[in-house]
Amino acid sequence: MKDDIAKLFDLAGKVAVVTGGGDGIGKGCAEILAAAGASVMVSDLSAEKARVVADGIVALGGDATPIACNVLDDGDLVNLVNNTVETYGTVNVLVNNAGVGGGGREDPFKIDRQYVERIYNINVIAPWRLCQLVVPYMAKSGYGSVVNITSMSSVNKEPDMGVYASSKAALNHLAANLAYDFGPMGVRVNNVGPGATRTHALESVLTPWLQEAMLAHTPLKRIGEVSDIAGAVLYFAAPVSAWVSGQTLFVNGGGVQTMGAGTR
C-alpha cells in the first residue's frame, strides 16, 4: 500500500523546468520536484542564484542544471527549452513561476504603459510562450503537466493592484482554456495561487500590524511557507493528479490576506 501511494508522487525519470527558480517559491518548487525524483532545469534571471539552487539539489543527491533566462526575451525562452531537451531529452513538467508586480504599489495615475506591458509580458505572455514550446515534447513523451503560479490577487479586490491582479486573473483563465487545447495531447494545465507566503517579496512589505490584520482573516492563523506552495505544485506535477486539469488551487490558510499588500 505504501509503495502504491509513493508511486502517485513519483517523478523519477521525468524532467521539470522551473522559471524564477533562484529563490522563494521557485526554489521550493525546484527542490521538491527534485526530491520526488525529477531532473530539474533551474531557470532564473540570475545565473548565480540558479547555480546555487541547482548545486544544493545535487548536494542532496538530486539532479539539477542551472540556466540563466530572462523570460522577457523570446530567444532566452527558446534557449531554455532547447538546453533542457539537449541535457535531459525532453520536458515533462513546466512550472511557470517567474512573475512580477503587486505589493499595492500600482497607483493607476503614476504607472505608465511600459509598466503595464512588462507585467503582462512576464506574467501572461511568457507562460503562454513556454507552453507553446514545451507541449509538443510533453505530448511526444506521453507525460505532461504545466503548473502556473498565479496569486490570490487574481480574485481579490484591492487598491493599487489593478495591473498585477488582472494579469494573474488572465493567467487563471489562460490555464483553464489551454487545458482544453492540450488535454487531447495528454497534457494537463493547472494553477497554484499562493496567499500571503513568506518570501523576500512579502517580507519587504510585511509589518507586525499588517501580519496581524492578515491573520484576522486567515482561519489557520499563520502566514504561508514556501513549502505549502511547493506541496501544491508537486500535487499537480505528479501522477496523483492525473485526471485534474484546468484548475486553480488557492493555498491561503482558508482565508483572504489583503490589506493593501502583495500576497505573493
Image: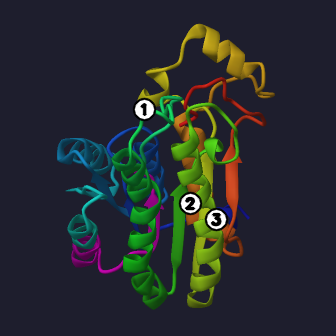
Which residue is found at the position 70% from the left and 46% from the top? 155
The answer to whether one can see residue 40 in this image is: yes
Which residue is found at the position 42% from the left and 32% from the top? 110
Say whether disc 1 or disc 3 marks the residue closer to the N-terminus: 1
From the image, tell me which residue sits under label 3: 173
The answer to whether one can see residue 37 in this image is: no
Point out the residue furthest to the top here: 208
Q: Secondary structure at mark 1?
A: loop
Please rate how many residues cluster around mark 1, counting C-alpha atoms within 10 Å: few if below 14, some from 14 to 19, many from 20: few
Please rate how many residues cluster around mark 3, counting C-alpha atoms within 10 Å: few if below 14, some from 14 to 19, many from 20: some
Determine which of the numbered discs, if any, sits on residue 171 in the image: 2
Q: Amino acid at mark 2?
A: Leu
Q: Amino acid at mark 3?
A: His
> Looking at the figure, which quarter contains the N terminus?
bottom right
Q: Is residue 127 left or right of residue 145?
A: left
From the image, tell me which residue sits under label 1: 110
In this rendered view, identify the residue nearer to me: 161 or 192.
161
Q: Mark 2–mark 3 contact, CB under 8 Å? A: yes
Q: Toward which corner of the image does residue 213 lie, by quadrant? A: top right
Q: Looking at the image, how many numbered discs can be counted on the residues?
A: 3
Please rate how many residues cluster around mark 2, counting C-alpha atoms within 10 Å: few if below 14, some from 14 to 19, many from 20: many
Residues shaded magenta: 81-98
Q: Amino acid at mark 1?
A: Lys
Say whether disc 1 or disc 2 marks the residue closer to the N-terminus: 1
Image location of residue 206, percent across then percent down: 53, 18
Point out the residue furthest to the front here: 109
